[in-house]
Amino acid sequence: MPRPFTPKAVTANALLEGDVIYLDQSGQWVRDLRMAQAFTEAEAAEAALSEAAKDGMVVGAYLTDVKLGEYGPEPAHFREEFRRTGPSNYFHGKQEAEAHV
């Protein structure tokens, strides 16, 4: 018996900057997971992934599991939380900006 479909978001890395990015409802890439489109149907998620993979400005596009949170999609697994916040060896980039808020 196949596993039930869980909500997904399309994610990739920006080719030039290397940043983690997510596909939003308008088909644009955003850097905040909470702004990403959460797909609740497998066919729609696969179609969005197929289109996203054709974008020459991204690498490694795939579907990631998300939880539907109060403010939008949230990571469902540690790996995505780690990708979202960046390397943990010292504060830089996103981590540094969040530390100064």
Image (cartoon, rainbow, N blue to C red):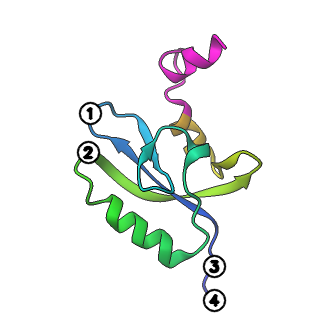
What numbered label is drawn on residue 3? 3
Residue range highlighted in magenta: 85-101
| Quadrant of the frame with the N terminus | bottom right
The tag earlier along the polypeptide, 1 or 4, is: 4
What numbered label is drawn on residue 79? none
Looking at the rendered structure, the kind of residue marked 3 is Arg
Residue visible at 53% across and 15% down? 90
Evaluate if marks 1 and 2 touch, with contact meaning CB atoms under 8 Å apart. yes
Residue visible at 60% across and 84% down? 2
Q: Quadrant of residue 7?
A: bottom right
Q: Which sits in the foreground, 11 or 27?
A: 27
The tag earlier along the polypeptide, 3 or 2, is: 3
Category of crowding for the residue at label 3, using alpha-carbon neighbours closer than 10 angstroms: few (below 14), some (14–19), many (at least 20): few
Q: Is residue 81 magenta?
A: no
Nearer to us of marks 2 and 4 is 2
Looking at the rendered structure, the kind of residue marked 1 is Leu
Residue ID for mark 2: 57
Q: CA distance from mark 3 to mark 2?
A: 33 Å
The tag earlier along the polypeptide, 1 or 2, is: 1
Residue ID for mark 1: 16
Nearer to us of marks 1 and 4 is 1
Looking at the rendered structure, the kind of residue marked 2 is Met
Position of residue 23 measured from the top left corner of the image (x, y, whole percent): 46, 52
Q: Residue furthest bottom?
A: 1
Q: CA distance from mark 3 to mark 4?
A: 7 Å
Residue visible at 32% across and 30% down? 17
Evaluate if marks 3 and 4 touch, with contact meaning CB atoms under 8 Å apart. yes
Q: Quadrant of residue 65?
A: bottom right
Q: Residue furthest front?
A: 26
The tag earlier along the polypeptide, 2 or 4, is: 4
Residue visible at 42% across and 66% down? 48
